[in-house]
Amino acid sequence: MKNKLEIFKKAQDLLDEPEVQELLEYCEKLEDELVDFKFEKNKNKELILLDMIKEVLKGCNAIEKEQMEHVRFGYEAPNYQATISNLKSYILEICRDNQIYLR
């Protein structure tokens, strides 16, 4: 898909026009609807699991970063029991909502 701003690369001054702004907003809305449609059309457990794994990895990376900061600055490391419980609840909720059976 072509980037909207690339279309106006040679005429940057047109981007300030209200009609062009309206057109760009409309394009963005259509792109969002297209993404939603593709997700609904392809709504399969693989995409759901992939999204869940990405979120879990983001959370794990954030926890590792926080842990390194505690070690670096000599703070006492927090108890991560609540974080682990929240992560487990998140995984189980996503699986339940999407009828993904882990056992």
Image (spheres, rainbow, N blue to C red):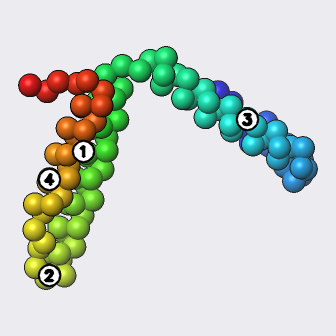
Residue furthest to the bottom? 74
- Separation of marks 1 and 4 at Cα, in angstroms: 9 Å
Q: Name the residue that disc number 3 marks.
A: 27
User: Looking at the image, which is closer to me, 95 or 15?
Assistant: 95
Image coordinates of residue 26 in percent, x first then y, are 76, 37
Marker count (numbered): 4
Q: Residue at x 68, y 37 (%)?
A: 29
- Separation of marks 4 and 3 at Cα, in angstroms: 41 Å
Give the left or right position of residue 67, taking residue 14 as reference.
left
- Separation of marks 2 and 3 at Cα, in angstroms: 49 Å
Precedes in sequence: disc 1 or disc 3: 3
Precedes in sequence: disc 1 or disc 2: 2
Q: Nearer the viewer, mark 4 or mark 3?
A: 4
Q: Nearer the viewer, mark 1 or mark 2?
A: 1
Task: Report the amino acid beneath label 2.
Answer: Tyr
User: Looking at the image, which is closer to me, 32 or 86?
Assistant: 86
Q: Nearer the viewer, mark 1 or mark 3?
A: 1
Instruction: Decide: is 96 above or below 14.
Output: above
Provide the secondary structure element on which disc 2 rests: loop
Image coordinates of residue 52 in percent, x first then y, are 30, 37
Image coordinates of residue 59 in percent, x first then y, are 27, 53
Residue 41: image tag: none
Provide the secondary structure element on which disc 1 rests: helix
Q: Name the residue that disc number 4 marks.
A: 85
Q: Nearer the viewer, mark 4 or mark 2?
A: 4
**Mark 1 burial class by Cα count in 10 Å: few <14, some 14-19, many 20+:** some
Q: Residue at x 16, y 45 (%)?
A: 88
Q: Residue at x 68, y 31 (%)?
A: 30
Instruction: Decide: is 7 above or below 34.
Output: below
Q: Is residue 48 visible?
A: yes
Tell whether label 4 touches label 1 (CB within 8 Å): no
Q: Name the residue that disc number 1 marks.
A: 90
